[in-house]
Amino acid sequence: MSLDATNETLDSSIHVFDATLERLAQRRQTDSKAPTDEVLSSARTVIAFPGGLDALYARVMTIEAAGVFSGRDWARPAILQPALAVRSLREGKPDITTIEALSEIRLLAVTAGDYFHSGISAEQARNFLTQVMALNLDLLAGPMSEADRERPENLGQIVQTLYQYLLAHLGYESILESLVDEIQRLLAQRPLQTDSIKQMISQIAKCLYDPAIETTGTVGAARLVRALFGPTPGCREDPGLDIYKQRLTTMDENTLVEEATGFARAMHDTGLVSPYHPVLLRHLQDCRDDLIPQALGLSMTGNDALQCYRQLVHTLINEAVFPETSQAVYGLAMLLERGALFSAPIASGLWRQIRLTLSNDTAETLRRIFGETQEPRVFLLAGVLSLLGQPLGVGQGNNPTCQSVIGLSMWADNVGDYLLQLVAWAARDDEVLSRFEGERISSRDLEPGLAKEPPLDVDPVSVVLIPHLDRLYMEMGRLCGERDDDLHRWINPEFYGWWVGQGFRVIADIHTGEIEDYDGFIRHFYACYHPFYNGNMPLIHPQPAGIVVTDSAARLVGRHAITLLRVALDANNEMRVYFFNPNNDSGQDWGQGIVCATQGNAERHGEASLPFAEFASRLFVFHYDPLEFDDSAAVPDDDVARVVELGRGSWAADY
């Protein structure tokens, strides 16, 4: 749609909004309870357009005078509570979310002095908005959650647009401390996609160096800025890449060691890689390659892998590590630390990936998304390094592709050579081959799966591979035809790998949708996965599972695929389930006090965890080995009853 056409559509929507507002004002003269649904529906349409929020901002006084807020808590803004406002925006029905959005636009006008309201001061309005934004920092940090993405009438996108608008007007300084905490929480999960985080740190840097902004006590903010723009003495003042490259040529041995150590420390401390780091690595290759292990922060294991595959590592640095692909440095370091190269097929697969010729379609897609600062093959190779080094860092973006993404994570962690084969097929041949129950299937001519459009907000490997995997998964479902159980029972072992348990349990009848033997389902899960009742058998291979996602009010959002990684006691002797959630941010609030942890309970980077019972209360489907020992009778009745109570008090109420 052209800009002129967009403006015409916005103008038309504003005209409709003004008309509905005038009708409401007239009705309120004789009926104080005249409905506002027409006005709120029209407002949602306006918000969806660029410039729509500006138009509503200019009409704040008219909106208030028409009686949109009358008769509700929003008529008395001083009594509004930030925590309740969050729920109104993120969980409310369309009209509730819209009236909350209009109220916050009104408070922004009060804060700026563009609108006087007798019920709240400018300072009170600003404090309120600051607190609400701090409670919604995930909206500023990247893609939306399932709960936001699945909301009707595009409400999730509307709310995210509102907060970007508030941020543009209020500035980061008002929420700087909370923002830093949120960034550190996200970085603790070591995501592959860090562009949005780096953009926020860039904004934080502007705040720190703006003399008009009070930044006293922002040690955490300075640490993030330093890690990205000046982690070592040689680039402390962010001199620019060319100047830093020149400086390296004049550094003596001790100075180079200090630079290498500083970069490695900052990278492993935050998970962020400074654009200066690749410049150092490429310099060391030419003159001091003995310092590369130090610059990567490698342990004995990582250094052994580097020395065994020295030529491959040097080639990977030459071909994939540039300032524009700086995060690949961390991926390479973690690839070595994991000892992945000690699997000969992975090393061979990487040599093939280095020399891989991309198809025209693949190259054009990568170029369109990641730009032209490097060749498309460079971005893809860098993405491969990141995924193999950080299998739990991959995310689905705003795409309904959780099944495929847990596959990427599982293969990167478990069978990296298979992942490299899939990437080669997809990137070179525009085709991925698979089999289902003996029948060969190809992704080439299949219709789109759950994702109707190619993903654009994901890492390079996902961009290339997910469309093929998504189509294959849906085709396997089609080939199943009519069967007497949930189709995942047959699809998952064929799609993911031989290690997926042949046993299968689903909580609801596929024909009636009703829950069957909830007690037995939970008892069986305990007996299969809880070490106290399964003969202390560890989880050997990651297992796909299905959960029911709920929002912070414990209301049903939908089903979602995750990977069970391990079950273990934490430092407090509480048994926890550690799992991979592909939804970009694993720290989700599922209501009833169930909040997924991502750190503080022995989680590895990228893992989420919950106490065993809390996780079990959201479980819908799991695989198991029917030949393994389990002792269902030993599972305490009280534990089962507690899980069932949590489930029936949340998502199961809808079944």
Image (cartoon, grey):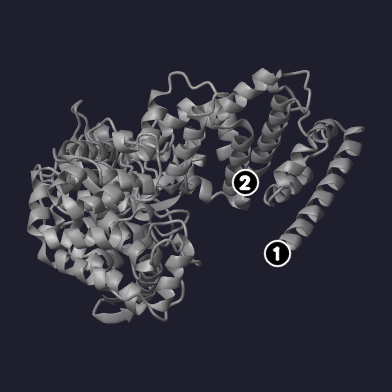
Q: Which is closer to the viewer, label 2 or label 1?
A: 1
**Circles 2 and 1 in contact, beta carbons < 8 Å:** no
Q: Earlier in the sequence, mark 2 or mark 1?
A: 1
Q: Position of residue 568 (x, y in %)?
A: 18, 38
Q: Amino acid at mark 2?
A: Ile
Q: Position of residue 319 (x, y in %)?
A: 27, 63
Task: Tell me if residue 557 comes above or below residue 122 in the rendering.
Answer: below
For label 2, the SS is helix
- Disc number at residue 158? 2
Name the residue nearer the viewer: 542 or 144. 144
Q: Residue at 43% of width from left, 42% of height from top?
A: 197
Q: Amino acid at mark 1?
A: Ser
Question: Which quadrant of the figure has residue 307?
Answer: bottom left
Question: Which quadrant of the figure has residue 105?
Answer: top right
**Number of numbered discs:** 2
- Disc number at residue 96? none
Q: Residue at 75% of width from left, 37% of height from top?
A: 57
Q: Residue at 49% of width from left, 29% of height from top?
A: 209
Q: Position of residue 565 (x, y in %)?
A: 22, 48
Residue under label 1: 2
Task: Tell me if residue 132 comes above or below residue 487 in the rendering.
Answer: above
For label 1, the SS is loop
Mark 2 and mark 1: Cα distance apart in space: 21 Å
Name the residue nearer the viewer: 95 or 433. 433
Q: Position of residue 470 (x, y in %)?
A: 39, 67
Determine whether, in the image, residue 230 is placed left or right of residue 289: right
Q: Classify 10 Å Cα crowding around label 2: few (below 14), some (14-19), many (20 and above).
A: many
Q: Residue at 10% of width from left, 48% of height from top?
A: 303
Name the residue nearer the viewer: 655 or 448. 448
Question: Quadrant where the N terminus lies?
Answer: bottom right
Q: Classify 10 Å Cα crowding around label 1: few (below 14), some (14-19), many (20 and above).
A: few
